[in-house]
Amino acid sequence: MPILEVNDLNVTFRGGIKAVRGVSYQLGQGEVLGIVGESGSGKSVTSLAVMGLLPPGAEVSGSVKLHGRELLDMPEDELIGLRGKTIGMIFQDPLSAFTPVYTIGDQIAEAVRIHQKIGKDKAAKRAVELLDLVGIPHPDVRAKAFPHEFSGGMRQRAMIAMAIANDPDVLICDEPTTALDVTIQAQVLEVLKTAQRETGAGIVMITHDLGVVAGIADRVLVMYAGKPVELGTVDEIYYRPRQPYTMGLLASIPRMDRPTARLIPIDGNPPSPAALPPGCPFAPRCPMRVSACDEAEPDLERIGPGTRMSACIRSHEIELKGLDGATIYPVPEAPAETAEPRPRAERDTVLSVENMIRHYPLMKGAVFKRRVGTVHAVDGISFDVAEGETLALVGESGCGKTTTLQQIMQLEAPQGGTVVVLGKDSATLARADRKALRRDLQIVFQDPMAALDPRMPVGDILAEPLRAHGHKDIGARIAELLSLVGLDPSHAQRYPQHFSGGQRQRIGIARALALEPRLIVLDEPVSALDVSIQAGVINLLEDLKVRLGLSYLFVAHDLSVVRHLADRIAVMYLGRIAEIGTVDEVYGRPAHPYTRALLSAIPLPDPDLERSRERILLEGDLPSPADPPSGCRFRTRCPKRALLGAEEARRCAEEEPSVVRLAPVVDHGAACHYPEEAEVVVTSRH
Amino acid sequence: MRSKVVLARLARNPQARYGLVALLLLLLLAYVGPFVGAHTWTDKDFLAFLEPPSAEHWWGTTQIGQDVYAVTLRGMQKSIVIGFLVALFSTGLAALVGAAAGYFGGWVDRALMWGADLLLVLPSFLIIAILSPNLKGGSWLWFVVLLAAFSWMITSRVVRSMTLSLREREYILAARYMGIPGWRIILRHVVPNLSSLLIIDATLNVSAAIIGEASLSFFGFGVQPPDVSLGTLIAAGSGQVTGYPWLFLFPAGLLVLLVLSVNLVGDGLRDALDPGSNQ
Ligand SMILES: Nc1ncnc2c1ncn2[C@@H]1O[C@H](COP(=O)(O)OP(=O)(O)O)[C@@H](O)[C@H]1O
Ligand code: SF4
Ligand code: SF4
Ligand SMILES: [Mg+2]
């Protein structure tokens, strides 16, 4: 018998917003059900409805049964008894789950005592045990810390500890690792698996990351526009998707394990939940649409002999013909490559950074600020970008990527070292030269909403750089820019709020292109976008690069996107470069232990691979950049160092390694005294 | 789009609705009223000194035979003009100074905020009282300048701190990295994005300025004869409240109504512009 049974769940918000429409699923003991879908598809609202945590004003219908008891009409005080005891919940933002004024240990102990009749010191002891279980080092000491003293990953682990404090039967996790870095995400997912083993709970795992689901779920439910569109075992969904949306979703992900020349985007945007199309909600974007699709919304129906369900009138045909995403979706044409690029050494260098340093003072005190230390945000990094090349800068948050970009964009003298843009040293620029150089150096930001002034129509946003640099015939140029990035030129009068996320990012790109720059700095340009939209923007960036002869400096944390887009990659750790080289070299033969751990932590959207993979799990968090370890900065977490002899290990602690070329002819260097040689990413069998 | 939402919210707020209607009626009275009355404010009726309200002189007459209705409306016009001008100047100054201090930082910030702090600690009432009558050669516009010069400082501090956070927004960074000059970023990106705050502030400044004008004029430091304002009229009438109450009651009543309605509109705007409020 299933522990949790959801039947025909519907949620409607004020204003006729149908956020969830007919979700049904069952969760068995010890089972992990993954719910995937793009943002706004109703994943979170579904789980809030199950927990009875929807805001007032939401209409809920259908049935949610926990151990056969209906939850939807249960009085609030009984529900409170269940929440945290029988059902635990883990959110994306762990800070909001803890009260700032109590210690973590007290709050976990409190959660224990609400549902179990045990003494105070016993509860406190249980809290320490739980923190130990989720892998918090020195749990007895850390239990006395306040939530803000924990890093993001530790807080997430503490939240898991709190959620499993009362041995719940069901754990609902809503994007539990989305805010975390990959190496921390790998740790947290491991903790979740341990927690499940300890409690035997069924887990509902909500995420937009198809890699995470592939590694942890037994069955997968795919949602689109508030409705489940496909349900099956994880292998069925990943290897034999039978619904065009699922097929498109899987085809649009850049794959680190088998890079393709071209990504396949799904055109268009998800429909607004207040204005759904009459028939199949996916019809406006579906490459297999026929006129019957617009007549009625297809229901989730069984296909094949098993428990496999799909909501598409052509599923049987897809099954019969064995179609997949790459065959039904048109693969966008790659731009014609103009002539073979000249060898790198012969091309101009558009950006060269040499030993750049950026330190911030660390201040303390509210009234009388005094300097108590130095944050080594960027501590002597060197790299260069050749014309027509994409260099990706990757690393975990806090490793100094943004600082590096800012320092370059400011076009001012760095605290140490040099920044040379298009042959001009930023330290010796006169005012007028700096302004002239800004034409050639542009930036695209991560959050397409924050980067566009909400009070300006798009036309004005694009006109701004043109006016500032004295362009004529601005109207024509705006129209040209909008069509260049695939937007309708007649939309110039609209405000940024009227565009979807992907379209806004295209506007940001159009603005960066306005002055015909030569080098564009891309700060996480696609990480705020859903995968199906992201593929289109990545393709656009590739096209523009070839057509306009651009060079990119590209900051990203998604290593699959980097593999797809970049020519070279520089891996940063704590303000230093750990490894740098061509993408093929670094992904194929990662030499630095940190790069190896990073690559092995990336979840791959391939269940078989995920099951068979060996992960290199790193211990602990990034050390504080205010107090970096002596010698090699990675030594506190380095798995390799543990295997070295005492004499060799001492060298790691005493001598700071610098980037050395690994072989005389290859473009590949690593900052490690004992670099490695073997491959870590296995390739897919499917 | 947004302004529509704001207007709809404003119209839904009962206080703001009454305030707006009252304010419009008062403006109508001040500017159209004089054409309806039989006398102009400079007329003197030598047959009626200190007459109570009557069919001929609706609100009575003064001791030199002026029509109280005409004179009060004339004074009200002046008070309104002063109120709106002072609000405009002081909010504009606050926006520019605060945004420049916040955006440029460094010595610009220190110098501007030092100036603001200095003006805050100076006894403004005393200074205006001393300076204003000595500027007789000039017009009442000097008075407006003085009032505005002493009422922008607190708002500019608020604007400055909001600019500090706006400055790190990506669209401002984007503009900076495109080579847009600082003052243009302030005018095109910073100030428009503070417009909610500034609109509310300007509205509330109107009523503060009207009161400030009235109190200074009451003591004879503001509007100088032969000009009249509500303040000078109240001062003139206050000595004879018991014997000839119409001299005092009409200007004082209008002052209260004016300030009240402006404040109602200001509060309503605050609710309508504040996205946190769920009206
Ligand atoms: N409190 C609310 N009021 C109105 N609409 C809401 C509310 N919460 C969520 N929605 C809408 O419901 C839809 C589904 O949201 P959600 O479940 O958060 O999506 P997901 O978790 O899949 O990203 C979205 O269109 C969202 O805007
Ligand atoms: S029902 Fe039609 S439009 Fe909908 S997914 Fe299937 S083929 Fe596409
Ligand atoms: S130098 Fe030593 S500690 Fe640093 S990465 Fe290499 S093996 Fe690890
Ligand atoms: Mg969500």
Image (cartoon, helix red, strand yellow):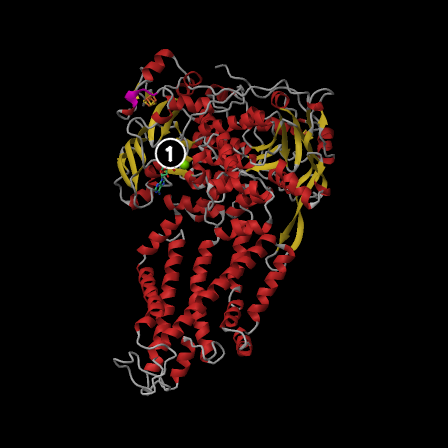
In x, y percent, where is residue A187?
Answer: 52, 32
- A28 relative to A381, above or below: above
Q: Is residue B131 visible?
A: yes
Question: Is-magenta flag for residue A292?
Answer: yes
Ligand 1 neighbours mark 1 (CB distance < 8 Å): yes
Decide which of A171, A642 is in the foreground and name it: A171
Q: Position of residue B189 (x, y in %)?
A: 52, 49
* Crowd class of label 1 (few under 14; some 14 to 19; many from 20; radius 10 Å): many
Instruction: Specify the subunit that label 1 lies on.
Output: A
Q: Is residue A173 left or right of residue A401?
A: left
Location of residue A582 (image quadrant): top right
State the image coordinates of residue A155 (x, y, percent, origin top left): 50, 41
Residue drawn at (48%, 40%), measured in percent from left and top? A459
Confirm whether the magenta stretch covers residue A124. no
Mark 1: which secondary structure? helix
Q: In front here: B38 or A529? A: B38
Residue B40, image x, y percentages: 36, 76
The residue that label 1 is drawn on is: A43
User: Image quadrant of ligand 3?
Assistant: top right
> In the image, which residues are magenta?
A289-293
Q: Nearer the viewer, residue A388 or A601?
A: A388
